[in-house]
Image: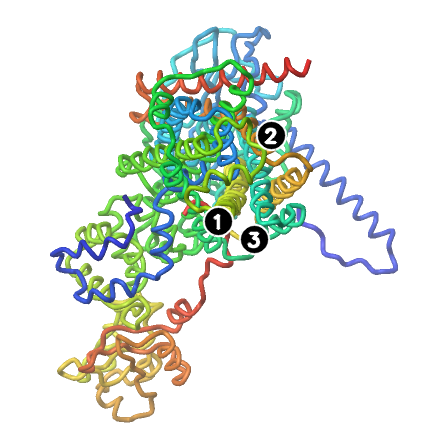
Amino acid sequence: MPRRPFLSRPSAPTDRLRRRVAARSERLITTRNVRRTLVSLVGIVGTPVRNQTGEDVGRLVDVVARVHGDERYPPVTGLVVRVGRRRAFLDAGAIQTVDHGGVTLRTSRLDLRDFRRRPGEVMLARDLLDHQLVDVDGVQVIRAADLYLAPVGDRLRLVGVDVSVQSLLRRLGPKALRGRPTPDRVIDWDAVQPFGDQLTTGPATVKLRTANRGLPRLRPGELADLLEDLRRPARQELLAALEPEQAADALEEMEPEELQALLREVEPSQAASLIAAMESDEAVDALRDLSEKERSEVLEAMSPDRARDLSELLAYPEDAAGGFMSTTLVVASDDKTAGQARELLKEFVEHRTEIDAVVVVDADGRLLEDLALFELVIADEHSRLADLLAVGEHAEAETVGPEANVREVAARLIDSRRSSVLVVDEDGHPLGRILADDVVDALTPDRGRLHFPRLFK
Amino acid sequence: VSTTPPVTREDDRGPSPERPSRPRQLWGRLPGRRVLMYAAIAGPGVIAANAGNDAAGIATYASAGSQFVYRTLFFMVLVTIALVLVQEMSVRLGTFTGKGIAALIREQFSLRLTAVALFCVLLANTGLVVSEFAGIGAAFELVGVSRYAVIPVAAVAIWALVLFGSYRYAERIFLVLSLAFFAYPVAAILAHPHWGKVATDLALPHFSASSAFLLLGVALIGTTVSPYMQLYAAAGVVDRGIGPDEYPSARLDAISGAVFACVISMTIIIATGAVIGGHGPLQSAKQAAEALRPVAGSGAELLFAIGLLGASALAGAVVPLSSSYAISEAVGVERSVSRRFTEAPLFLGLFTFQLVLGAAVAMTPVNLIKLLIGTQVLQGIVTPVVLVYILILANRRDVLGAAANGPIRRVAATLVVFAISAMSLLLLGQTLLGLL
């Protein structure tokens, strides 16, 4: 509940007190009302199912809801009830009320069928409760301690996931307390990402891809955190649900060991397409961490061009400029016009973060100048690049050889005050670019120190 | 295996066209520490072997040798089979589900049963922490430093090391120190044991109904098949991203690790039995160090102390970490475990609690060796409970699919768990009757 801004005058303490009391009682009433309308899944599982006349007909085993559907809050589609020794399915239409005392049915006649999962349906207690879910709003992996149902519109729906430790303790406690909702840390179901993999019976007909409302909103770093925190089945499903580009961005943000483990889990072909979609320097880092055999498997599954590029980069030592440069370069010969160069840039939209200049080369492909984007933008559309260079109002290209180490590169960047330096070979052919952030990465000492030591390495 | 030491890369420079043509760079890009790490920790196998070699393990094996000479060897053969079966199941659970054992228990059992399992893990591991601190104390007492001075310092040091320091480096130092115990196989040969007797005791069962033998038997189970090893084995394969494809090599690693651990344990029994066998129960660490005299002569005590310190300090950090991790995983806050400590109050609390309790109990003025064996008896009683969970999980087809235990493995594993449980219950019953 939003707290009111603190506006009170210091001279009116009673006023403040009154307001606080009012806010408190309002909160209590809300909590009580919420608690009354919410039905705790833990509380109703195992309770008796009665018919209209109040006769016990069986015990509730599980609640079935269409989780992988179009609706924001999954509707309850039926109940799994144990009648005698038999487990049967009861359609939601037969339910009169559901509360902590148990389930009351609309009719006295029971129409029992064997349970068969229909598309999108999930058994809540068995497949969601106590399993890993993703909270897309809070960007975290959670384990459901309880699920809350509430009547929304005409149907009973799954509305929230309880993740508090308090709920765990309540479930350990006496039976009377078990079903009492403790809605202190509840996550709105709308923000929760379930995994189809948790359906252990029958084929999961609706996969995550259709239900990934929240995923596209997440930033690469947040996705990386989620990928690190999930266990393998859910992790692979999340990965499969992402667009290759989005997945590659997330992988670039992962801790090296986690990335290594993840690449081992997936098929070489999938690993290859993920690595191919990563920025070259990150891709090379990822490849370096794999074993020789795994690396050649992954490279073989890649397109020959990309594999050759990456292999060349792999040949440089990890700590030399050639080893951490990015090979994405926008190269234009000096007879092109500024307009043509700008056209060229459009092909590199997906690399926008690693391009801060256009490499101008002569007819033999030797570096002439590293023309900053700003210069290119203010230039007249029809003026040739050679003419722009001749004016000489721009900074000189900063270059290093592929064998230069991190400190040399850093010194260059500091001297020139540019955001990147070019890597050129002995003949002056441009090989790649090193951005300032790559240098920061390379210079930052062992990031692991700030982190929890990995237990089982 | 994914854990193939990169050292071999030098050899397999095959005809692959992408291969860089400069071999020196292959070495250059391998930081020395990584080579050391791979060499030191090849797989969960070596770690399992090391787990058997911790303070309590040494005390128990040495006590077995001193009290019953070679007569517990046949029992150790059975324990080896049990360990192989159990470790294989744990690794299988890890590879095929991609989840740790605690997570699986939470997902597959009711919350109350999960709480029971985790309580047992916590109990067993806290017992183990006690024994590790006792081991550190014993190691320093051998070189004349009072344990009352050392144990608090060690507790704070381990705590700070895991929280703020470079735990990974420390882990490797401890591991190298504990390699001193590899002197035991040599000692076993140099001590000229009666090999004929060793062979018959290995092959023929010897059971005596005396409570001392039973007690030691349960302690041997407890120290060899401890719950933390199963959690560790499963988490190890999950953490390395080992999937069903690599299961055969993961299984090989688990089995060879288990066999190796037990072979080392047996050499400890043989070495101790040959040197001080028949002297009755082991009284002090000094006495246990005697077994290394054939190797190290007058340096035996120092060698023993170094090994004991390394093994105890390593396990003293790893064991509380693994139980805290298991509980966090089951509660569902493992996220914070891989993040910073300030975000993980539950984890931090459990870790601190176990260290404090362990150190405090280890400081009580009792006979160290008795304390060590006592903690192993506790382990032996708790272990069957955790094994039952693992057995049920490994039997379930909806957890492992086609990789679930088949009929033969199911019978064998059930027998093992049943036998271990029966021993523990027998001991429990005898202890309770003795109290009356």
Classify mark 3: residues with Cα within 10 Å, few (<14), some (14-19) or many (20+): some
Asked whether disc 3 touches disc 1, contact meaning CB atoms under 8 Å apart, the reply is no
Q: Position of residue B152 (x, y in %)?
A: 65, 48
Q: Residue B375: horizontal and vertical position, in percent?
A: 57, 31
**Quadrant occupied by the N terminus of chain B:** top left
The picture quadrant where one finds residue A185 is top right
Q: Nearer the viewer, mark 3 or mark 1?
A: 1
Q: Which residue is mark 1?
A: B299
Q: Residue at x 53, y 32 (%)?
A: B121
The answer for how far apart the CA atoms under marks 3 and 2 are is 41 Å
Label 3 chain ID: B
Q: Is residue A99 left or right of residue B436?
A: left
Give the alpha-carbon distance from disc 2 to disc 1, as whole Å: 71 Å
The image shows residue B342, relative to residue A201, as above or below, that is: below
Residue marked by disc 2: A38
Tell me the number on the disc at residue B163. 3
Q: CA distance from mark 3 to mark 1?
A: 35 Å
Q: Amino acid at mark 1?
A: Gly
Q: Is residue A60 above or below residue B4?
A: above
Position of A128 compared to A346: left or right?
right
Task: Give, as a three-letter code, the residue at label 3.
Answer: Leu
